[in-house]
Amino acid sequence: KIGRIADESTASKRFFSGWIDEVRIWDNARSGSDLDDDRNEHINPNSNDLVAYWRFNEGTATTINDLGP
């Protein structure tokens, strides 16, 4: 559950109120400078240690594609 508070027993109705443009899952911890460098940029889907990558820009369909390796 992306954008939802982790402890559902205490906050079952608390969701992120906003838009999520991209989701990236990495196989390692990213440094603050790594996050800053890649912010507002599409990254190479074949980047080292990238596990999954969704851009959420498929258009009007209801399915998104994992662009990761």
Image (tube, grey):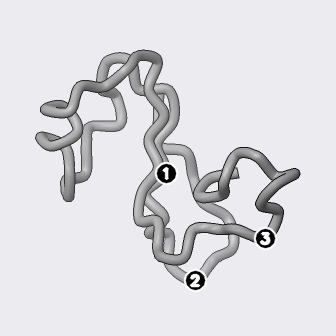
Relative depth, front residue between 51 and 14: 14
Q: Secondary structure at mark 1?
A: strand
Residue 42 percent coordinates (x, y): 25, 51
Residue ranking furthest to the front: 10
* Residue 35 quadrant: top left
Q: Residue at x 48, y 76 (%)?
A: 18
Q: Residues within 10 Å of mark 2 (few under 14, many from 20)?
A: few
Q: Nearer the viewer, mark 2 or mark 3?
A: 3
Q: Secondary structure at mark 2?
A: loop
| Label 2 with label 1: CB-CB less than 8 Å | no
Q: Which residue is mark 3?
A: 13
Q: Which residue reaches farthest right? A: 9
Q: CA distance from mark 2 to mark 3?
A: 27 Å
Tell me which residue sits at (57%, 68%) in the image: 16
Instruction: In the rendered view, tell whether residue 67 sits above or below residue 15.
Output: above
49 horizontally vs 16: left or right = left
Which label's residue is closer to the chain start, 2 or 1?
Answer: 1
The amino acid sitting under disc 1 is Trp
Question: Type of residue at label 2?
Answer: Thr
Mark 2 / mark 3, whichever is N-terminal: 3
Pinpoint residue 67: horizontal percent, then vertical percent: 47, 43
Say which amino acid is labelled 3: Lys
Mark closest to the chain's N terminus, 1 or 3? 3
Q: Residues within 10 Å of mark 1 (few under 14, many from 20)?
A: some
Which dot marks residue 54? 1
Q: Could you say where residue 4 lies in the image, as x and y percent from the top left?
A: 66, 57
Check disc 3 and report its element: helix, strand or loop.
loop
Residue drawn at (70%, 46%), measured in percent from left and top?
6
Residue at 41% in and 26% down: 50
Give above or below for 21 relative to 38.
below
When asked about the image quadrant of residue 32, the answer is: top left
Tag of residue 60: 2
